[in-house]
Image (spheres, rainbow, N blue to C red):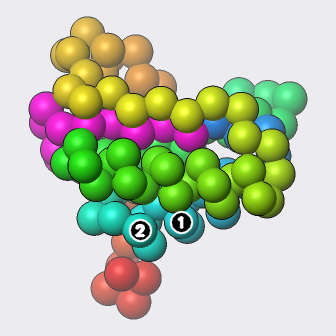
Amino acid sequence: MNTDFPGNALGMIETKGLVASIEAADAMIKTSAVQLYGQEEIGGGYVTVYVRGEIGAVRAAVDAGAAAAKAAGDLVAVHVIARPHNSVEKIIPDSVSVVKLTADED
């Protein structure tokens, strides 16, 4: 996982269903100054969305994303890690990388 925010928080929301994950991602990036790192689909409809940023921003974003996911579908899990250890960074799937937004999408 490419970490443009080394040492900063990692926020994760897991949902059952793509729509709930998209709602969560939308709420997270609209709520706080966080960077969307992507999503991972593990099968069975389970999707995890990842964001990075300062701890306060990530917590606010994850709270908003969890509420949006719950309203849109099934919220499975929510978690924030304040400063993931380098060993933890290594186990985050390579498929999860920084989502590059164009100027029109900011």
From the top left corner, tell me how far across and down residue 66 is, in percent. Answer: 60, 49
Q: Give yes or no for residue 87 being in the magenta stretch.
A: no
Whether residue 59 sits left or right of residue 86 in the image: it is right
Label 1 Cα neighbours within 10 Å, binned few <14 / some 14-19 / many ≥20 = many
Element type at mark 2: helix
Q: Which residue is mark 2?
A: 31
Q: Residue at x 20, y 27 (%)?
A: 83
The amino acid beneath tag 2 is Thr
Does residue 19 appear in this view?
Answer: no
Q: Are marks 1 and 2 in contact (CB under 8 Å)?
A: yes
Q: Which mark is drawn over residue 51?
A: none
Furthest residue toward top: 87
Whether residue 104 sits left or right of residue 44 in the image: it is left
Q: CA distance from mark 1 to mark 2?
A: 6 Å
Q: Residue at x 33, y 27 (%)?
A: 81
The span picked out in magenta is 2-13
From the top left corner, tell me how far across and down residue 37 is, in percent. Answer: 40, 48
From the top left corner, tell me how far across and down residue 31 is, in percent. Answer: 41, 68
Q: Which residue is mark 1?
A: 27
The amino acid beneath tag 1 is Ala
Q: Give yes or no for residue 3 being in the magenta stretch.
A: yes
Q: Is residue 105 above or below residue 9?
A: below
Nearest to the observer: residue 44 or residue 28: 28
